[in-house]
Amino acid sequence: RISLQILTIYLIMDFIGNALRMSMEAEGSFELQRLLESSSNATIKKIADEFRGHVCEMVESPHGNHVLQRLIELMPPQSVSFILEEIAVKWKPGYIARHKFGCRVLERIIEHFPACQGTGIELARYLDGLLQNGLSHFFHSFATFVIQHILEHGTVEQQLLVLTHLKQDLWKVATDV
């Protein structure tokens, strides 16, 4: 019988150098997420480093976006801050909030980055572009979930800005189905 530890080491060796390709495939993405959950921070960081320069490609992937989400959940924000940096270089916040996969990655970032000094500041700057447009994102099928995450995990200032926008057209907010 192969021990779980030996099997994990074998899987890690198989993924190192192949993580990007495997994250883009359904089975590889699933296996990679499971491996990340059982690996040390050092191993996760080594795998995450393979995604530098490829974040936007992964955001657009129906499989790769799940790997990014897992990384954000498992690693300290400063270790995966490159994810937000690469997204911010390519896309405005309104675009990513309305993207069917990007919104999920942004939701994980909103959940995990605000409490961390440095990443919280960068996230706040990025979200300002989303919040300045007010109601335009509140009724979009994907962006509405990003707004809900801001209400739950955002700063007090961000939450107040969302509420201010909601009050502008309370009737539409209350009757939207």
Image (cartoon, grey):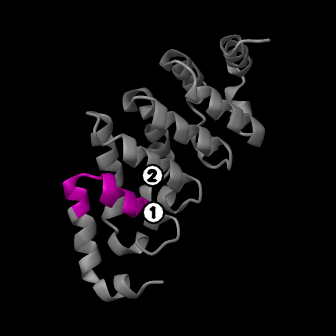
Do the residues under discs 1 and 2 have CB atoms within 8 angstroms?
yes
Q: For mark 2, what is the residue?
A: 107
Q: Magenta part of the protein: which range? A: 145-159
Query: Can residue 157 be found in the magenta stretch?
Result: yes
Q: Residue at x 35, y 84 (%)?
A: 174
Mark sitting on residue 145: 1
| Few, some or many residues within 10 Å of mark 1 (<14, 14–19, 20+) | many
Per the image, label 1 sits on a secondary structure element best described as helix
Mark 2 element type:
helix
Residue 54 location (% of width, % of height): 60, 35
Q: Is residue 24 left or right of residue 75?
A: right
Vertically, is 53 above or below 157? above
Residue 86: assigned label? none
Q: Amino acid at mark 2?
A: Glu
Instruction: Using residue 14 as the reference point, say whether residue 110 is left or right of it.
Output: left
Q: Position of residue 77 (x, y in %)?
A: 39, 32
Which part of the image, by quadrant, shows the N terminus?
Answer: top right
Of 77 and 51, nearer the camera is 77
Nearest the eye: 152 or 2: 2
Q: Residues within 10 Å of mark 2 (few under 14, many from 20)?
A: many
Mark found first going from the N terminus, 1 or 2: 2
Residue at the image point whose x is 71% and y is 12% from the top = 3
Q: Amino acid at mark 1?
A: Phe
Image: 155 above or below 48: below
Residue at the spot 47% in from the left edge and 37% down from the top edge: 72
Question: In screen coordinates, is 87 left or right of 67?
Answer: left
Q: Is 78 positioned to the left or the right of 70 in the image?
A: left
Residue at 38% across / 63% down in the picture? 147
Q: Is residue 14 above or below residue 164?
A: above
Percent of width and height locating residue 90: 51, 47
